[in-house]
Image (cartoon, grey):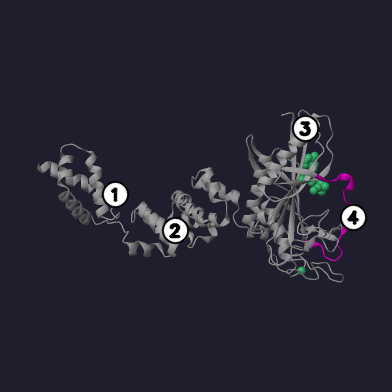
Amino acid sequence: MKYIPTIGLEIHAELSTKSKIFCDCPVGFGGEPNTRCCPVCTGMPGTLPVLNKTAVEYTVKAGLALNCQINEFSKLDRKNYFYPDLPKAYQISQFDLPVCKDGGLTINTPEGEKFIRIERIHLEEDAGKLLHDSYDNYSLADYNRCGVPLIEIVTKPDLSSSDEAREFVEKVRLMLLYSGISDCRMEEGSLRADVNVSIRPVGTDKLGTRTEMKNINSIRGIARCIDAEIERQSELLDEGEAITQETRRWDDNKGESKSMRSKEDAHDYRYFPEPDVVPISFTKQQIEALRHSLPELPNKRFAKYTADFGLSETDANLLLTSVSLSDFFESTAKECGNPKAASNFIIVEVLRRLNDSGLAAEAIPFGGNVLGRLLKMVDGEEITAANAKKVLADMFDTGMEPEAIVAGKGYKVINDTGEVENTVREILAANEKAVAEYLEGKEKTFGFLMGQCSRALAGRGNPKVVQDILRSELNRLKGSC
Ligand code: ADP
Ligand code: MG
Ligand code: ZN
């Protein structure tokens, strides 16, 4: 490698408030174009915005989850630009006093842990969507997304590779998801990133000229666009050419970017304090109350799963991929008192079922505590592990309680040794030839006889007990020969 890459991200997340940031239009993906808007979010003259309190609180929660400081005083600013997706011709955003500043997250790299600094998180309104491809001579505008509350998380240029960027965005995504402030659906554009990339020759300190790729809406796209841009810039420097500071459009299908506009045509946004919205102020107590309202975040849960529960990092990460799955696991573990068994059963049996049926953890038709009761029965040797899987299948199909399924199907392990003894004796009587072979020293027939007994007990025999009784019955026969 002749060059050192530097990457900075601007991550946008749409907040999952019920209504938009300055009016009471509903927030939601899709919908018939222009059915979720009103004079306020379409910027009609004479209308006035009213700031959504929940949107501000969600921004604070995002900041707290991402280890930021919260400004007790912040304000909104008007960012002027004309583009038809923004009917007011200005966006209400934040300029010099964002809600959150100076945070960051630790990521794992092959060289060890690395702290990626977050410069700021500010609150703003989303713009509408333009559809350019449907007609030849004109474009269509859909203003449903106008005024959806949006936060922008700006990192310092601390990332050095596409892998680091991927890991960082995944971590940020999980933090926001667990904070409950955004659904972070990249495929629906509720989480998207602008990617800034520069390179500099090894042995130098001054950062190179950066380019920016806007609105990338998949983690894979972010990683691919970084790699492609590092390669493109390296080729230019190799040929002795300069990098121009510009905005480039990334085409994820082609896997390449094209220049959109250079810094020279950059807008002068003429920021000024938004006169129609009062500034935001918080007391320390209000900020602490919001901190306490956050659920346990994924980094804490990870530490608990690995250190306290003894799960592997891979298993812990798997269980943490969604809030529902992690909550489900925790209530299963709590109920059965055996986190390791709960983790194994969920990862092997429950996740397989979800994958096969293409369902998410939200769709599990019973609570984690109910699964916990099933696992407690296995732990207490009331049912066998094999039958537990059958019970699980029925729980998925019928939503019935495990106790009812076990009783109905007669899965309860027979702990009455008398019943097992009787069955074993019957089997031995019915298989004289096999018994004779065993007594002549053919140990293999033991397995055969064991199988016969298990079948006769319909899988309800505690295998250990059946084995012991079979062994002692055979020994008895041996003694009497
Ligand atoms: P703008 O508002 O024009 O996009 P900012 O100064 O806010 O500019 O920077 C935006 C992003 O670019 C930040 O994430 C920052 O870390 C990143 N960045 C700044 N300089 C560089 C650089 N030389 N190489 C890579 N990324 C950079
Ligand atoms: Mg930018
Ligand atoms: Zn509206």
Q: Amino acid at mark 2?
A: Leu
In this rendering, position of residue 211 left or right of residue 425: right
Q: Residue 159: in sight, yes or no?
A: no
Q: Amino acid at mark 4?
A: Arg
Find disc 1 in the rendering and name its residue. Answer: 463
Cα–Cα gap, marks 2 and 4: 59 Å
Q: Which mark is residue 371?
A: 2
Q: Is residue 166 visible?
A: yes
Observer-nearest of 376 and 434:
434
Q: Which residue is mark 4?
A: 270
Q: Which residues are magenta?
A: 259-280
Earlier-in-chain disc, 4 versus 1: 4
Q: Is residue 326 left or right of residue 272?
A: left
Picture quarter with ligand 3: bottom right
Rendered residue at 27%/53% (across/down)? 455
Mark 4 element type: loop
